[in-house]
Image (cartoon, rainbow, N blue to C red):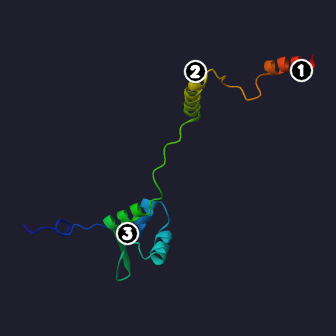
């Protein structure tokens, strides 16, 4: 039995409407990219355009922007992570006898005591 063309020809080609559907853009955009970007892999034959699937997918991967970004945590998870970070950074300060959670000027009670000693 003679092999069919699909068995002997392993390349798969996409049409401009198929490329547009994959990228969720208009067919007009695909043709504009074809005109403006010579690196876009395409086969032009007798007024038709076909895009070799494997080369097109590689072309897309090569144009992906930057490294993968970490997933943004929901607000509640961010607050818990921040709270955990504060607790771990406060532990060394407490062990060294420093007060935690006050600014350099001290609390209101310390200010009141200080003003009493200066008034006398």
| Measured Cα–Cα span from mark 2 to mark 1 | 32 Å
Q: Is residue 31 above or below residue 97?
A: below
Query: Residue 45 shows which numbered tag?
Result: none
44 or 64, which lies in front?
A: 64
Residue 98 higher or lower than 40, as above or below: above
Q: Quadrant where the N terminus lies? A: bottom left
Q: How crowded is mark 3: few (under 14 residues within 10 Å), some or many (20 or more)?
A: some
Q: What element carries label 3?
A: loop
Indicate the quadrant where residue 94 lies: top right
Q: State the mark number for residue 15.
A: 3
Residue 67 against residue 11 in the figure, above or below = above
Residue at mark 2 to residue at mark 3: CA–CA distance: 69 Å
Q: Is mark 2 on a helix, strand or loop?
A: helix
Asked if residue 87 is positioned above or below residue 78 in the image, the reply reads: above
List x then y, in percent, for residue 29. Answer: 50, 69
x and y percent of residue 111 in the render? Answer: 82, 22
- Quarter of the image where one finds residue 117: top right
Quadrant into which the C terminus falls? top right
Residue at (45% x, 50% y) in the render: 68
Pointer 1: what residue? 118
Observer-nearest of 54 and 95: 95
Residue 34: image quadrant is bottom left
Q: Nearer the viewer, mark 1 or mark 3?
A: 1
Q: In the rendered structure, which disc, 2 or 1, sits on the residue that comes first in sequence?
A: 2
What residue is rendered at 84% in x and 19% in y? 112
Image location (x, y in percent) of residue 9: 20, 69
Nearer the camera: disc 2 or disc 3: 2
**Residue 82's spot in the image, x, y percent?**
58, 32
* Residue marked by disc 2: 95
Structural crowding at the residue carrying mark 1, measured as other residues with C-alpha within 10 Å and reported as few (<14), some (14–19) or many (≥20): few
- The first of marks 1 and 3 along the sequence is 3
């Amino acid at each position: 039995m003679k092999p069919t063309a699909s068995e002997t020809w392993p390349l798969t080609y996409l049409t401009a409407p198929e490329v547009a559907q994959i990228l969720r853009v208009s067919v007009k955009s695909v043709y504009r990219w074809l005109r403006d970007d010579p690196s876009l892999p395409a086969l032009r034959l007798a007024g038709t355009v076909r895009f070799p699937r494997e080369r097109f997918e590689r072309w897309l991967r090569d144009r992906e922007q930057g490294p993968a970004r970490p997933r943004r945590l929901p607000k509640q998870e961010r607050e818990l992570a921040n709270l955990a970070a504060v607790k771990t950074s406060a532990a060394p300060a407490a062990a060294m006898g420093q007060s935690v959670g006050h600014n350099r000027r001290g609390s209101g009670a310390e200010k009141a005591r200080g003003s009493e000693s200066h008034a006398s």
